[in-house]
Amino acid sequence: MFVSEIDMLSPRSLKECLFILENEKSSLRLLAGGTDAVVRMKEGKWRPDYWVNLKHVDELRFITIQKDEIQIGPLTTHSEIINSPLLQAHADVLVQACQEIGATQMQNMGTIGGNIATASPAGDTIPALYALGAVIELTSLSGKRMINVEDFFIGPGKTAAQPNEIISKIAFNVRGKNDIGIFQKLGPRKAQSISIVNAAVTLSMKQGTKECTGGRIAFGSVGPTVIRAKKCEAMLTLGPLTDEMIANIGRVAWKEVMPISDIRASASYRRDMASALLERGLYRLLKRWAEHEE
Amino acid sequence: MKTIDFCVNGKNVSVICSPAKTLLDVLREDAGLTGSKECCGKGECGSCTVLLNDVPVCSCLVLAGQVEGERVVTVEGIGTKQAMDPVQQAFVDEGATQCGYCTPGLIVASRAYLTSIGHVPGLDEIKRALGGNLCRCTGYTKILQAVQTAAARQLSSREL
């Protein structure tokens, strides 16, 4: 099939979009920011009968706070997340992750929903959403369902979303003033690169101490999906985060990740870097916490 | 084939093309605006940068069907030979162009960046803002100089 034979549907509402997904018998692909989808079309991998252009489904573009929950529409671009005062205050780890995605042009085009649905093991927003304990709302004509972000990803490019479903919301709880988070990325170069390893960490600190009452650690690009390092997380609450404790957590991370060797890096390098990124992230978080306490 | 109506550089245009044709190809082949260049075709190099509703994007990854009713500005809309934009004038004065292939994208991205700030940016700030525009000739030194020069002139003309 040639690119010139591909047609486009541009629904004006979520309902119209869902109706297309439910009833259209031709092959379809959703098109959000296009930073990944259009490249795949050019490479010949994706040649659907129709692109479903989501650009005009404005109801999927929002950043709001409802009681204790922050809600983000899937068509929100990375730039909109970076520039949102609400997310800067309540989801530092996600803002930092979006800042690490590509360059200005890609941040202006790419959407958080697209980053999730593409389900790349190296996707930068995904570890941040793991660390925030986010839930994803999927909508179809027959209703809505919520799914934990960790259960959403099945493998590279594979998700729990059915063909008639669309991501309609990303939500997570507002974080307290003792909650801090950081996103760390190692790419082949400083700017606009695909991650060799990335790590997102959130900690809930105990006032006036170096101890934390809980935390989440997620790694990207070290397995078929983003993973949560639950053994490392369990160590966070064993005692104060001393140099020795941080080194131990780093060693556990080395064992807990399951990377492969590929074009970007070898498995053993990825292991080393996963533990280094985590240790560095913990030190940076503690430094920030100490400054905040002063 | 579909008829797609949109606004380029302030003029309404109507083109008949496949909706999956890239905006870049539409601009170059159907609208006769050959300023924007295709280089990597994957959104990594920025030589196809245009403004879509005032925001810099890679036109090689935007499809024609997505720009129906939208506003596009290409390098031709930033300034003309007769009336150059301060960014274009600064690129000329500083010699910030060699083969010229990346220049249209850099002009558009620099224009958008300088419109969004109100000071003369430092080198690191410019590097971050223009990280999506690659140049294989200049080594960037003169490009960075040109952006600073343009920013300084823009600021002094505002103060006048």
Image: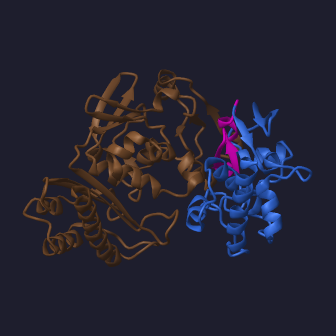
Residue segment shown in magenta: B49-69
Q: Can you tell which chain is drawn brown?
A: A
- Chain that the image shows in blue: B
- Depth order, front residue of B142/A68: B142
Q: Which of B118 and B14 is in front in this view?
A: B118
Above or below, A152 relative to B139: above
Q: Which residue is drawn at 67% across and 54% down?
A: B109
Q: How far across and down, in percent of the image, does residue A50 sit?
A: 60, 36
Say if residue A123 shows up in the picture.
yes
Whether the magenta-drawn stretch holds residue B65 is answered as yes
Q: How far across and how far down the image is residue A57, in percent?
A: 53, 28
**Left or right, B56 with reference to A76:** right
Q: Which residue is drawn at 77% across and 69% down?
A: B96
Residue placed furthest toward the right: B82
From the viewer's side, name the closer residue of A178 and A190.
A178
Residue at x 38%, y 73% (from the top left corner): A261
Left or right? Give the position of A58 relative to A150.
Answer: right
Left/right of residue A192 with respect to residue A243 in the rendered view:
right
Quadrant into which the C terminus of chain A falls: bottom left
